[in-house]
Amino acid sequence: LSSFRLIQNGQDVSAQAQVNQCCFAFTPTADVPEGVVSLHVEVRDIAGNLGEANWTYITDRTAPVIFDVRPPPASVQTAARPVVSGSMRNGSGIDPTTFRLTQNGVNVTGQTQVTASSFTFTPGTDVPEGLVLLHSEVRDLAGNLGLTDWTYVLDRTGPSFGVPQPPDGARIEEDRPEIRITYLDALSAIDVSSVRVLVRGVDVTGSAVITSTGISYTPP
């Protein structure tokens, strides 16, 4: 060889390369920025003939991002078989073959539709009520691992009520007895805005004291 030149991302790094008659090696002295790395090499033989080569590769040290997951984290669902889905992205590209999804510890990857940018899982059987745990993970084409965990609550059972006061069928002497009753939802929570109080068919909600655990109403 009569001359050698190596360019990386437009910068001449020839002086840092090890070169002999058959080959060369270059080890960067600083971290190479993530993204597309372009390389150009040119050599001349003793007769002055020029040989050139150009190629690129991608540096990717960032894990894939799994986002926009459904059902939304910490949400309350009522469908018997909530669809689980999400999106994925990464600079070097997603490797769909490495995707994994578990629901309540059970691997459901085989029933999941996976592409290079998204996944969708529709349960084949009803999901048990209560807290549902979801875990998804995937690697990009560079081998970086990205993962996410989230939960939602499945609640298909209505709230339960305590014993009303006065009790059902009771005979009382008071002219304006206080009416009280408690309620509870074991899986999610009471939607206080949905509570309605009717006395003899008349809506008296506005005059009642309503909390997350019960109501009380005293006739005027």
Image: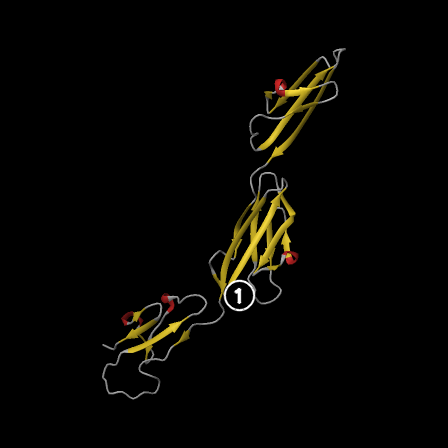
Residue pictured at 39% horizontal, 66% vertical:
191
Q: How many marks?
A: 1
- Residue 174 screen position, x and y as percent: 23, 84
82, 38: nearer the viewer: 38
Residue receiving disc 1: 79
The image quadrant of residue 4 is top right
Residue pictured at 61% horizontal, 67% vertical:
125
The image quadrant of residue 57 is top right
Q: Is residue 207 above or below residue 112?
A: below
Which quadrant is home to the C terminus? bottom left
Asked whether residue 106 is in view, the answer is yes
Q: Is residue 3 above or below residue 139?
A: above
The image quadrant of residue 168 is bottom left
Q: Is residue 150 left or right of residue 139?
A: left
- Residue 36 screen position, x and y as percent: 60, 31
61, 127: nearer the viewer: 61
Q: Is residue 33 above or below residue 207?
A: above
- Residue 193 screen position, x and y as percent: 36, 65
Q: Secondary structure at mark 1?
A: loop
Amino acid on which the number 1 mark rests in the picture: Ala
Q: Is residue 5 left or right of residue 103?
A: right
Q: Residue furthest top?
A: 47
